[in-house]
Amino acid sequence: MSSLSRAAHRDRREGPGVIAGLAAVVVVAAVAVTAVQGLVAPREALAFGALIAFGELIRLRLPDDRVQSPIALAGALGYALLSHLPGNMPALHSILQTIAITACGTLIGALPHVIAGRSAELEGIAPRILVVGAIACVFRPAVLVPDIYQWLETHRPAFVVFTILVAVLTWPLQSAVAAAVGAGRRLGPFGALFRNELRAFIGIGSAIASSGVLIALATWEVGLWTLPLFSIPLLLAQMAYRRYAAIRRTQMQTILALSRSTEVGGYTETGHARRVADLALSIGRDLGLNEDRLNTLQYAALMHDLGQLSLADPIPGGATLLVTPDERRRIASLGGAVIRQTGVLEEVAAIVEAQAEPYRRPHLPDDADVPQEARIIKVANAYDDLVGASLADEARVDALERLRLGMAYEYDPRVVSSLARVLNRTASVPL
Protein backbone atom coordinates (compact mmCIF):
# COMPACT_ATOMS: atom_id res chain seq x y z
CA MET A 1 0.00 0.00 0.00
CA SER A 2 1.39 3.43 -0.93
CA SER A 3 1.88 6.15 1.66
CA LEU A 4 -0.98 8.06 0.04
CA SER A 5 -3.26 5.06 0.46
CA ARG A 6 -2.07 4.49 4.04
CA ALA A 7 -2.80 8.08 4.99
CA ALA A 8 -6.18 8.02 3.26
CA HIS A 9 -7.06 4.82 5.12
CA ARG A 10 -6.04 6.40 8.42
CA ASP A 11 -8.03 9.56 7.68
CA ARG A 12 -11.16 7.54 6.92
CA ARG A 13 -11.08 6.52 10.58
CA GLU A 14 -9.87 9.78 12.10
CA GLY A 15 -11.46 12.41 9.84
CA PRO A 16 -15.06 12.14 11.09
CA GLY A 17 -13.93 11.85 14.73
CA VAL A 18 -14.70 15.47 15.63
CA ILE A 19 -18.18 15.25 14.07
CA ALA A 20 -18.95 11.98 15.84
CA GLY A 21 -17.61 13.29 19.16
CA LEU A 22 -19.67 16.46 18.94
CA ALA A 23 -22.79 14.48 18.06
CA ALA A 24 -22.19 12.09 20.97
CA VAL A 25 -21.94 14.97 23.46
CA VAL A 26 -25.11 16.60 22.11
CA VAL A 27 -27.05 13.31 22.13
CA VAL A 28 -26.03 12.40 25.70
CA ALA A 29 -27.07 15.85 26.93
CA ALA A 30 -30.36 15.74 25.01
CA VAL A 31 -31.30 12.25 26.22
CA ALA A 32 -30.38 13.06 29.82
CA VAL A 33 -32.40 16.28 29.93
CA THR A 34 -35.36 14.68 28.17
CA ALA A 35 -35.31 11.73 30.58
CA VAL A 36 -35.35 14.08 33.58
CA GLN A 37 -38.04 16.38 32.22
CA GLY A 38 -40.18 13.68 30.62
CA LEU A 39 -41.57 13.55 27.11
CA VAL A 40 -43.80 16.33 25.88
CA ALA A 41 -46.64 14.89 23.72
CA PRO A 42 -45.33 11.32 24.13
CA ARG A 43 -47.71 9.79 21.57
CA GLU A 44 -46.39 11.98 18.77
CA ALA A 45 -42.80 11.58 19.97
CA LEU A 46 -43.05 7.79 19.87
CA ALA A 47 -44.73 7.85 16.44
CA PHE A 48 -41.99 10.00 14.93
CA GLY A 49 -39.33 7.92 16.68
CA ALA A 50 -40.81 4.75 15.15
CA LEU A 51 -40.76 6.33 11.67
CA ILE A 52 -37.12 7.35 12.12
CA ALA A 53 -36.20 3.85 13.31
CA PHE A 54 -37.94 2.30 10.30
CA GLY A 55 -36.13 4.65 7.94
CA GLU A 56 -32.78 3.75 9.46
CA LEU A 57 -33.60 0.07 9.27
CA ILE A 58 -34.04 0.27 5.47
CA ARG A 59 -31.21 2.72 4.93
CA LEU A 60 -29.67 3.02 1.48
CA ARG A 61 -26.05 2.54 0.42
CA LEU A 62 -25.16 4.90 -2.42
CA PRO A 63 -22.85 3.92 -5.31
CA ASP A 64 -19.99 5.93 -3.76
CA ASP A 65 -20.34 3.75 -0.63
CA ARG A 66 -21.97 6.48 1.47
CA VAL A 67 -25.03 5.54 3.48
CA GLN A 68 -28.21 7.64 3.40
CA SER A 69 -31.53 7.21 5.21
CA PRO A 70 -34.07 9.34 3.33
CA ILE A 71 -37.14 8.26 5.33
CA ALA A 72 -35.37 8.60 8.68
CA LEU A 73 -34.06 12.07 7.83
CA ALA A 74 -37.43 13.20 6.44
CA GLY A 75 -39.17 11.93 9.61
CA ALA A 76 -36.64 13.70 11.84
CA LEU A 77 -37.06 16.93 9.87
CA GLY A 78 -40.84 16.58 10.13
CA TYR A 79 -40.54 16.30 13.92
CA ALA A 80 -38.16 19.28 14.11
CA LEU A 81 -40.55 21.36 11.93
CA LEU A 82 -43.75 20.28 13.70
CA SER A 83 -45.55 23.40 14.87
CA HIS A 84 -49.04 22.08 15.69
CA LEU A 85 -50.36 18.79 17.00
CA PRO A 86 -53.65 17.29 15.82
CA GLY A 87 -56.42 19.39 17.31
CA ASN A 88 -54.54 22.63 16.56
CA MET A 89 -52.52 22.51 19.78
CA PRO A 90 -48.96 23.87 19.70
CA ALA A 91 -46.22 21.25 19.48
CA LEU A 92 -44.16 22.20 22.52
CA HIS A 93 -41.39 19.62 22.39
CA SER A 94 -38.00 21.24 22.92
CA ILE A 95 -34.87 21.32 20.81
CA LEU A 96 -33.25 18.74 23.08
CA GLN A 97 -36.27 16.44 22.88
CA THR A 98 -36.13 16.67 19.08
CA ILE A 99 -32.49 15.60 19.14
CA ALA A 100 -33.18 12.84 21.67
CA ILE A 101 -36.03 11.33 19.66
CA THR A 102 -33.99 11.56 16.45
CA ALA A 103 -30.97 9.91 18.04
CA CYS A 104 -32.90 7.17 19.83
CA GLY A 105 -34.95 6.33 16.74
CA THR A 106 -31.85 6.26 14.56
CA LEU A 107 -29.85 4.06 16.95
CA ILE A 108 -32.76 1.66 17.42
CA GLY A 109 -33.06 1.36 13.64
CA ALA A 110 -29.31 0.73 13.35
CA LEU A 111 -29.35 -2.00 16.03
CA PRO A 112 -30.58 -4.81 13.72
CA HIS A 113 -27.72 -4.01 11.34
CA VAL A 114 -25.23 -4.38 14.19
CA ILE A 115 -26.82 -7.66 15.30
CA ALA A 116 -26.54 -8.92 11.72
CA GLY A 117 -22.82 -8.14 11.74
CA ARG A 118 -22.99 -5.00 9.61
CA SER A 119 -21.60 -1.61 10.53
CA ALA A 120 -23.73 0.76 12.62
CA GLU A 121 -22.62 3.51 10.20
CA LEU A 122 -22.13 6.01 13.04
CA GLU A 123 -20.08 8.06 10.60
CA GLY A 124 -23.27 8.79 8.63
CA ILE A 125 -25.60 8.93 11.64
CA ALA A 126 -23.68 11.67 13.49
CA PRO A 127 -23.94 14.30 10.71
CA ARG A 128 -27.69 13.65 10.30
CA ILE A 129 -28.29 14.17 14.02
CA LEU A 130 -26.33 17.43 13.97
CA VAL A 131 -28.22 18.67 10.91
CA VAL A 132 -31.59 17.91 12.52
CA GLY A 133 -30.39 19.60 15.72
CA ALA A 134 -29.42 22.70 13.77
CA ILE A 135 -32.81 22.79 12.02
CA ALA A 136 -34.52 22.44 15.42
CA CYS A 137 -32.45 25.31 16.81
CA VAL A 138 -33.71 27.55 14.02
CA PHE A 139 -37.35 26.45 13.99
CA ARG A 140 -38.37 25.35 17.51
CA PRO A 141 -38.13 28.87 19.05
CA ALA A 142 -40.94 29.92 16.68
CA VAL A 143 -43.22 27.56 18.62
CA LEU A 144 -41.65 27.75 22.08
CA VAL A 145 -41.31 31.55 22.35
CA PRO A 146 -44.85 32.83 23.06
CA ASP A 147 -44.49 36.20 21.29
CA ILE A 148 -43.14 34.66 18.08
CA TYR A 149 -45.73 31.90 18.18
CA GLN A 150 -48.63 34.30 18.65
CA TRP A 151 -47.54 36.44 15.70
CA LEU A 152 -47.10 33.43 13.41
CA GLU A 153 -50.40 31.93 14.63
CA THR A 154 -52.24 35.04 13.52
CA HIS A 155 -50.39 34.92 10.17
CA ARG A 156 -50.64 31.24 9.30
CA PRO A 157 -49.38 31.59 5.72
CA ALA A 158 -46.23 33.05 7.26
CA PHE A 159 -45.96 29.91 9.43
CA VAL A 160 -46.03 27.76 6.30
CA VAL A 161 -43.49 29.93 4.48
CA PHE A 162 -41.21 29.96 7.51
CA THR A 163 -41.38 26.15 7.74
CA ILE A 164 -40.42 25.80 4.08
CA LEU A 165 -37.55 28.29 4.36
CA VAL A 166 -36.09 26.51 7.37
CA ALA A 167 -36.38 23.14 5.60
CA VAL A 168 -34.40 24.54 2.66
CA LEU A 169 -31.48 24.97 5.07
CA THR A 170 -31.19 21.18 5.21
CA TRP A 171 -29.51 21.12 1.81
CA PRO A 172 -26.52 23.42 2.56
CA LEU A 173 -26.23 22.15 6.15
CA GLN A 174 -26.07 18.50 5.09
CA SER A 175 -23.63 19.40 2.32
CA ALA A 176 -21.43 21.45 4.67
CA VAL A 177 -21.18 18.65 7.23
CA ALA A 178 -20.43 16.07 4.52
CA ALA A 179 -17.76 18.37 3.06
CA ALA A 180 -16.25 18.88 6.52
CA VAL A 181 -16.00 15.10 6.96
CA GLY A 182 -14.40 14.79 3.51
CA ALA A 183 -11.94 17.58 4.25
CA GLY A 184 -11.12 15.87 7.54
CA ARG A 185 -10.28 12.74 5.55
CA ARG A 186 -8.05 14.89 3.34
CA LEU A 187 -10.12 14.04 0.29
CA GLY A 188 -9.87 17.63 -0.93
CA PRO A 189 -10.31 21.29 0.04
CA PHE A 190 -13.54 22.14 1.84
CA GLY A 191 -14.74 24.58 -0.85
CA ALA A 192 -14.48 22.10 -3.71
CA LEU A 193 -16.02 19.30 -1.64
CA PHE A 194 -18.86 21.60 -0.53
CA ARG A 195 -19.74 22.50 -4.12
CA ASN A 196 -19.67 18.84 -5.05
CA GLU A 197 -21.89 17.88 -2.12
CA LEU A 198 -24.37 20.62 -3.03
CA ARG A 199 -24.69 19.17 -6.52
CA ALA A 200 -24.87 15.58 -5.29
CA PHE A 201 -27.49 16.32 -2.62
CA ILE A 202 -29.82 18.39 -4.78
CA GLY A 203 -31.89 15.45 -6.04
CA ILE A 204 -32.38 13.31 -2.96
CA GLY A 205 -32.01 16.34 -0.70
CA SER A 206 -34.93 18.20 -2.24
CA ALA A 207 -37.09 15.08 -1.87
CA ILE A 208 -36.12 14.68 1.79
CA ALA A 209 -36.64 18.36 2.65
CA SER A 210 -40.00 18.58 0.87
CA SER A 211 -41.17 15.35 2.53
CA GLY A 212 -40.17 16.72 5.93
CA VAL A 213 -42.21 19.87 5.32
CA LEU A 214 -45.22 17.89 4.11
CA ILE A 215 -45.06 15.58 7.12
CA ALA A 216 -44.93 18.52 9.52
CA LEU A 217 -47.75 20.49 7.88
CA ALA A 218 -50.00 17.49 7.20
CA THR A 219 -49.66 16.23 10.79
CA TRP A 220 -51.12 19.58 11.81
CA GLU A 221 -54.24 18.95 9.71
CA VAL A 222 -54.56 15.18 9.32
CA GLY A 223 -52.83 13.70 12.35
CA LEU A 224 -50.32 10.90 12.72
CA TRP A 225 -51.71 9.03 9.70
CA THR A 226 -49.57 11.48 7.76
CA LEU A 227 -46.38 9.67 8.75
CA PRO A 228 -46.89 6.43 6.79
CA LEU A 229 -48.86 8.21 4.05
CA PHE A 230 -46.11 10.67 3.11
CA SER A 231 -43.35 8.12 3.59
CA ILE A 232 -44.64 5.95 0.73
CA PRO A 233 -43.27 8.17 -2.10
CA LEU A 234 -39.85 8.23 -0.46
CA LEU A 235 -40.00 4.47 0.04
CA LEU A 236 -40.78 3.90 -3.65
CA ALA A 237 -38.03 6.31 -4.71
CA GLN A 238 -35.60 4.56 -2.38
CA MET A 239 -36.45 1.17 -3.87
CA ALA A 240 -35.84 2.50 -7.38
CA TYR A 241 -32.56 4.11 -6.34
CA ARG A 242 -31.48 0.87 -4.65
CA ARG A 243 -31.83 -0.91 -8.00
CA TYR A 244 -29.86 1.86 -9.71
CA ALA A 245 -27.12 1.59 -7.05
CA ALA A 246 -26.95 -2.18 -7.58
CA ILE A 247 -26.52 -1.66 -11.33
CA ARG A 248 -23.77 0.89 -10.70
CA ARG A 249 -21.96 -1.49 -8.35
CA THR A 250 -22.15 -4.28 -10.91
CA GLN A 251 -20.78 -1.94 -13.57
CA MET A 252 -17.91 -0.95 -11.29
CA GLN A 253 -17.09 -4.58 -10.53
CA THR A 254 -16.98 -5.31 -14.27
CA ILE A 255 -14.68 -2.36 -14.89
CA LEU A 256 -12.42 -3.39 -12.00
CA ALA A 257 -12.16 -6.90 -13.42
CA LEU A 258 -11.40 -5.51 -16.88
CA SER A 259 -8.77 -3.16 -15.49
CA ARG A 260 -6.94 -6.08 -13.88
CA SER A 261 -6.55 -7.87 -17.21
CA THR A 262 -3.34 -5.96 -17.92
CA GLU A 263 -1.97 -6.96 -14.50
CA VAL A 264 -2.91 -10.62 -14.92
CA GLY A 265 -1.32 -10.63 -18.38
CA GLY A 266 1.90 -9.16 -17.01
CA TYR A 267 1.61 -5.89 -18.92
CA THR A 268 1.41 -3.61 -15.87
CA GLU A 269 2.43 -3.81 -12.23
CA THR A 270 -0.04 -5.17 -9.72
CA GLY A 271 -2.20 -2.37 -8.33
CA HIS A 272 -1.15 0.20 -10.94
CA ALA A 273 -4.63 0.86 -12.34
CA ARG A 274 -6.17 1.16 -8.87
CA ARG A 275 -3.42 3.52 -7.67
CA VAL A 276 -3.82 5.72 -10.75
CA ALA A 277 -7.61 5.79 -10.26
CA ASP A 278 -7.33 6.67 -6.57
CA LEU A 279 -4.84 9.45 -7.28
CA ALA A 280 -6.88 10.76 -10.21
CA LEU A 281 -9.99 10.90 -8.01
CA SER A 282 -8.09 12.84 -5.34
CA ILE A 283 -6.91 15.34 -7.96
CA GLY A 284 -10.42 15.54 -9.45
CA ARG A 285 -11.92 16.33 -6.06
CA ASP A 286 -9.24 18.93 -5.41
CA LEU A 287 -10.08 20.60 -8.73
CA GLY A 288 -13.80 20.56 -7.93
CA LEU A 289 -15.09 18.07 -10.51
CA ASN A 290 -18.72 17.14 -9.93
CA GLU A 291 -19.87 13.63 -9.05
CA ASP A 292 -20.72 12.59 -12.62
CA ARG A 293 -17.34 13.69 -13.92
CA LEU A 294 -15.59 11.96 -11.02
CA ASN A 295 -17.35 8.72 -11.92
CA THR A 296 -16.28 9.04 -15.54
CA LEU A 297 -12.75 9.92 -14.44
CA GLN A 298 -12.60 6.82 -12.23
CA TYR A 299 -13.75 4.52 -15.03
CA ALA A 300 -11.26 6.00 -17.50
CA ALA A 301 -8.38 5.86 -15.02
CA LEU A 302 -9.06 2.21 -14.24
CA MET A 303 -9.03 1.29 -17.93
CA HIS A 304 -6.38 3.70 -19.21
CA ASP A 305 -3.88 0.91 -19.97
CA LEU A 306 -6.15 -1.53 -21.81
CA GLY A 307 -4.38 -0.75 -25.08
CA GLN A 308 -1.25 -2.46 -23.78
CA LEU A 309 -2.96 -5.82 -24.33
CA SER A 310 -2.23 -5.33 -28.05
CA LEU A 311 1.54 -5.20 -27.52
CA ALA A 312 3.60 -8.19 -28.66
CA ASP A 313 6.22 -7.44 -26.00
CA PRO A 314 5.16 -5.86 -22.69
CA ILE A 315 6.75 -2.57 -21.70
CA PRO A 316 9.09 -3.08 -18.72
CA GLY A 317 6.97 -2.50 -15.62
CA GLY A 318 4.11 -1.36 -17.86
CA ALA A 319 5.44 2.21 -17.65
CA THR A 320 4.19 3.96 -20.80
CA LEU A 321 6.34 6.91 -19.79
CA LEU A 322 9.27 4.89 -21.19
CA VAL A 323 7.95 4.62 -24.76
CA THR A 324 7.76 7.21 -27.53
CA PRO A 325 4.85 9.66 -27.73
CA ASP A 326 3.62 7.98 -30.92
CA GLU A 327 3.58 4.60 -29.18
CA ARG A 328 1.69 6.09 -26.22
CA ARG A 329 -0.90 7.48 -28.62
CA ARG A 330 -1.23 4.10 -30.35
CA ILE A 331 -1.76 2.34 -27.01
CA ALA A 332 -4.31 4.95 -25.94
CA SER A 333 -6.15 4.69 -29.25
CA LEU A 334 -6.34 0.90 -29.02
CA GLY A 335 -7.60 1.15 -25.44
CA GLY A 336 -10.32 3.57 -26.48
CA ALA A 337 -11.35 1.21 -29.28
CA VAL A 338 -11.74 -1.66 -26.79
CA ILE A 339 -13.89 0.48 -24.49
CA ARG A 340 -16.06 1.63 -27.41
CA GLN A 341 -17.03 -1.98 -28.01
CA THR A 342 -19.20 -1.79 -24.87
CA GLY A 343 -21.46 0.71 -26.63
CA VAL A 344 -22.20 2.61 -23.40
CA LEU A 345 -18.90 4.24 -22.38
CA GLU A 346 -18.27 6.61 -25.27
CA GLU A 347 -17.14 9.47 -23.02
CA VAL A 348 -14.77 7.17 -21.13
CA ALA A 349 -13.29 5.95 -24.43
CA ALA A 350 -12.68 9.54 -25.58
CA ILE A 351 -10.86 10.33 -22.34
CA VAL A 352 -8.69 7.20 -22.58
CA GLU A 353 -7.74 8.12 -26.17
CA ALA A 354 -6.88 11.71 -25.20
CA GLN A 355 -4.81 10.85 -22.10
CA ALA A 356 -1.67 10.36 -24.22
CA GLU A 357 -1.92 13.85 -25.76
CA PRO A 358 0.00 16.88 -24.43
CA TYR A 359 -2.20 19.57 -22.96
CA ARG A 360 -0.81 22.10 -25.50
CA ARG A 361 1.37 22.21 -28.60
CA PRO A 362 4.46 24.41 -29.05
CA HIS A 363 3.55 28.05 -29.64
CA LEU A 364 -0.17 27.28 -29.24
CA PRO A 365 -2.61 27.80 -26.35
CA ASP A 366 -4.20 24.99 -24.35
CA ASP A 367 -5.73 22.29 -26.54
CA ALA A 368 -9.47 22.44 -25.83
CA ASP A 369 -9.87 18.98 -27.36
CA VAL A 370 -7.98 17.40 -24.44
CA PRO A 371 -10.54 16.96 -21.63
CA GLN A 372 -9.57 17.84 -18.09
CA GLU A 373 -10.13 14.22 -17.08
CA ALA A 374 -7.55 13.10 -19.66
CA ARG A 375 -5.05 15.65 -18.34
CA ILE A 376 -5.57 14.34 -14.81
CA ILE A 377 -5.04 10.71 -15.87
CA LYS A 378 -1.91 11.67 -17.81
CA VAL A 379 -0.37 13.24 -14.69
CA ALA A 380 -1.54 10.49 -12.32
CA ASN A 381 -0.29 7.75 -14.64
CA ALA A 382 3.12 9.39 -15.15
CA TYR A 383 3.49 9.88 -11.41
CA ASP A 384 2.71 6.23 -10.68
CA ASP A 385 5.04 5.09 -13.47
CA LEU A 386 7.82 6.98 -11.68
CA VAL A 387 6.94 6.09 -8.09
CA GLY A 388 4.88 2.89 -8.21
CA ALA A 389 4.16 1.51 -4.75
CA SER A 390 7.17 3.23 -3.18
CA LEU A 391 6.67 4.68 0.30
CA ALA A 392 9.71 6.96 0.14
CA ASP A 393 9.08 10.69 0.22
CA GLU A 394 12.29 11.17 -1.77
CA ALA A 395 10.83 9.22 -4.69
CA ARG A 396 7.67 11.33 -4.55
CA VAL A 397 9.69 14.57 -4.55
CA ASP A 398 11.79 13.42 -7.52
CA ALA A 399 8.70 12.32 -9.47
CA LEU A 400 6.90 15.58 -8.84
CA GLU A 401 9.96 17.55 -9.91
CA ARG A 402 10.14 15.59 -13.16
CA LEU A 403 6.48 16.32 -13.86
CA ARG A 404 7.09 20.01 -13.20
CA LEU A 405 9.82 19.98 -15.84
CA GLY A 406 7.21 18.82 -18.35
CA MET A 407 4.66 21.54 -17.63
CA ALA A 408 5.57 23.53 -20.74
CA TYR A 409 3.69 21.16 -23.03
CA GLU A 410 3.08 17.67 -21.62
CA TYR A 411 1.48 18.15 -18.21
CA ASP A 412 -1.16 20.74 -17.37
CA PRO A 413 0.34 23.02 -14.65
CA ARG A 414 -3.02 23.21 -12.85
CA VAL A 415 -3.16 19.42 -12.59
CA VAL A 416 0.46 19.15 -11.44
CA SER A 417 -0.19 21.84 -8.80
CA SER A 418 -3.24 19.89 -7.67
CA LEU A 419 -1.15 16.71 -7.46
CA ALA A 420 1.33 18.57 -5.23
CA ARG A 421 -1.50 19.67 -2.93
CA VAL A 422 -2.85 16.12 -2.75
CA LEU A 423 0.58 14.71 -1.94
CA ASN A 424 1.32 17.43 0.61
CA ARG A 425 -1.70 16.33 2.63
CA THR A 426 -0.03 12.98 3.26
CA ALA A 427 3.71 13.71 2.97
CA SER A 428 6.07 14.01 5.92
CA VAL A 429 8.11 16.63 4.05
CA PRO A 430 6.86 19.51 1.85
CA LEU A 431 6.73 18.66 -1.83
Image: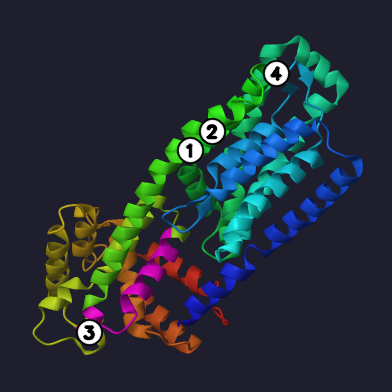
User: Percent x, y for residue 209?
Assistant: 57, 33
Circle 3 residue? 322
Q: Which residue is mark 4?
A: 159
Q: Give the amino acid at mark 2.
A: Ser
Q: Is residue 405 visible?
A: no
Image height of 143 relative to 35, above or below: above
Q: CA distance from mark 4 to mark 2?
A: 23 Å
Q: In this rendering, which labeled residue sits more in front, label 4 or label 1?
A: 1
Q: CB under 8 Å between callouts 2 and 1?
A: yes
Name the residue type under label 1: Leu
Judged from the image, the secondary structure of the residue bearing numbered disc 2 is helix
Most extreme residue toward the top, as rendered? 154
- The answer to whether mark 2 and mark 3 are in CB contact below 8 A is no
Residue 330 seen in this snapshot: yes
Badge 4: residue crowd in 10 Å (few <14, some 14–19, many ≥20)? some
Q: Secondary structure at mark 4?
A: helix
Who is closer to the viewer here, 335 or 88?
Answer: 88
Mark 2 → mark 1, Cα distance in angstroms:
6 Å
Q: CA distance from mark 4 to mark 3?
A: 68 Å
Q: What coloring was used for the rendering?
A: rainbow
Q: Which residues are magenta?
A: 262-284
In the picture of the structure, the residue carrying the numbered disc 1 is: 235
Residue at the image point whose x is 12% and y is 74% from the top? 326
- Residue at image position (54%, 76%) is 7
As drawn, 6 above or below 341: below
Q: Secondary structure at mark 1?
A: helix
Q: Determine the CA span between mark 4 and mark 1.
A: 28 Å
Disc 2 designates what residue?
Answer: 231
Q: Amino acid at mark 3?
A: Leu
